[in-house]
Image: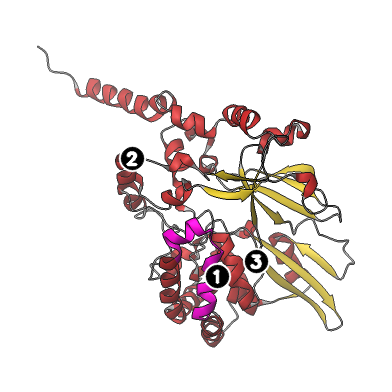
Amino acid sequence: MKRIRWYTRLSLFLFLFLVGFFILPNILNSRERKAFSNEERLKVAALKFNIHTIADSIEVVPGDFYRRGNLVRWLLGSAYRELWHLEITVPVLKLGEVKGGLIPIDFTGRHQTIGIKVRDSSGQIWSVRSVNKDQSAALPSFLRTSILRPMFRDQACSMNPFGSLVVAELAPALNIHCDTPRFYFFPYDKKLGKYNDRMAGRLVTLIRRWDDTKKDSGSAVRILDTQEMLSASKSENIRVDSILYLRTRLFDMLISDWDRHEGNWKWLKKTEAGGAIIIPLAIDRDMAFYRFGNGSINKLSRLFVNMFQSFTPEFKSVEGLMEQSASLDAAILKRLTKEDFEREAHFIQSRLTEDLIAEAFKAYPKEVYSIVGPEHQQILKQRLIQLPEAANKFYELIQGN
């Protein structure tokens, strides 16, 4: 028998690789299809969650897709899987009965989050946002048919689905802006048409929108996006409250919220007798208390990607925590002193007392608190002790940029 030539072996290897990388994930994926299929979701919602028959509250699982066996856990880690497949009780979002009546007006959501905009009886705009994410949207389109799609979708389990509830309890003590979300279940309501198609059957949060409170250019109060803020601070010479931004960024690091890119900020421009000032508004706390899985693939990925920083007792990498916001940090914080960084770290330490921390984590649903509440309290207190050291590292990194 003739020896198989090297290029025949290479061709066979490439063929098997392509089959495993692009074909098998789209054949052996019934569980994934069921979890992310709009058709399946609407079918179940119409049968079981009709607005005319559903109760005022319901028991729901945030994301049963993340309930995985030992092999997947070994490869992709455990993260917060136990929270995602935990059954919790939430009120049903009957739009006509909330905030004086909510009327859908548009779709929202960028990349991974699905949502709609609604208007209340006073004209205020709110966001209804899905709690579960589709992280495959972060992939380039040509990779969304590959094995990376189910892997990326699985890694949504690294997010703490209830972390924003605790942030809303901690941030006010530091005079830091935060959203105050409330969890609901979105029922099936045929009258909502395309909005029903998008949201029915989902666990969602209701959050006030800031970008829709924008006034005319001559108003005393305006909401800016990040590019408008940067332009105003340069061309109009309007001062940004850099100390408050620094405090907010140190708080981000304290809770391991590494995803603070430009799109996760709004900016309040206030014009008063003494002049104008721009105040930072931190939005979208999906990554608070992040827990990147300890799976084999996760460990390998850390060699190449540093930003997925977990909520652990130690600050593993301040540089990783600022990777998504390095340019914005430098633009706003470069002129501050080391003493400013140290002072704000000590301010946060003084305001986040043991009693406040203990009370804040009780914002978790009781089922969630019993699993991670005490552990998260201890981790936060340990990180708080190390915050001045992290602040000094933060300062050094900014001055090096």
Front: mark 2 or 1: 1
Relative side of 263 to 294, left or right: right
The residue wearing badge 2 is 69
Q: Name the amino acid, label 1.
A: Ala
- Residue found at x 71% / y 72%: 279
Q: Is residue 58 visible?
A: yes
In the figure, 295 relative to 173: above or below? above
Q: Residues within 10 Å of mark 1 (few under 14, many from 20)?
A: many
From this viewpoint, which residue is outermost toward the top?
Answer: 1
Disc 1 is placed on an element classified as helix
The residue wearing badge 1 is 360
Q: Name the amino acid, label 2.
A: Gly
Q: Which residues are magenta?
A: 353-373
Q: Say which quarter of the image contains residue 95.
A: top right
Q: Say which quarter of the image contains residue 3.
A: top left
Q: What whole-number distance in Å separates the C-alpha atoms at marks 2 and 1? A: 33 Å
Q: What whole-number distance in Å separates the C-alpha atoms at marks 2 and 3? A: 36 Å
Front: mark 2 or 3: 2
Q: Most prominent secondary structure in the magenta stretch?
A: helix
Q: Name the amino acid, label 3.
A: Cys
Q: Which mark is residue 47?
A: none
Query: Considering depth in this image, is 219 or 291 the residue closer to the camera?
Result: 291
Task: Give the mark nearer the N terminus: 2 vs 1.
Answer: 2
- Residue found at x 80% / y 43%: 105
Relative side of 342 to 103, left or right: left
In the figure, 62 relative to 392: above or below? above
Q: Position of residue 255 (x, y in %)?
A: 50, 67
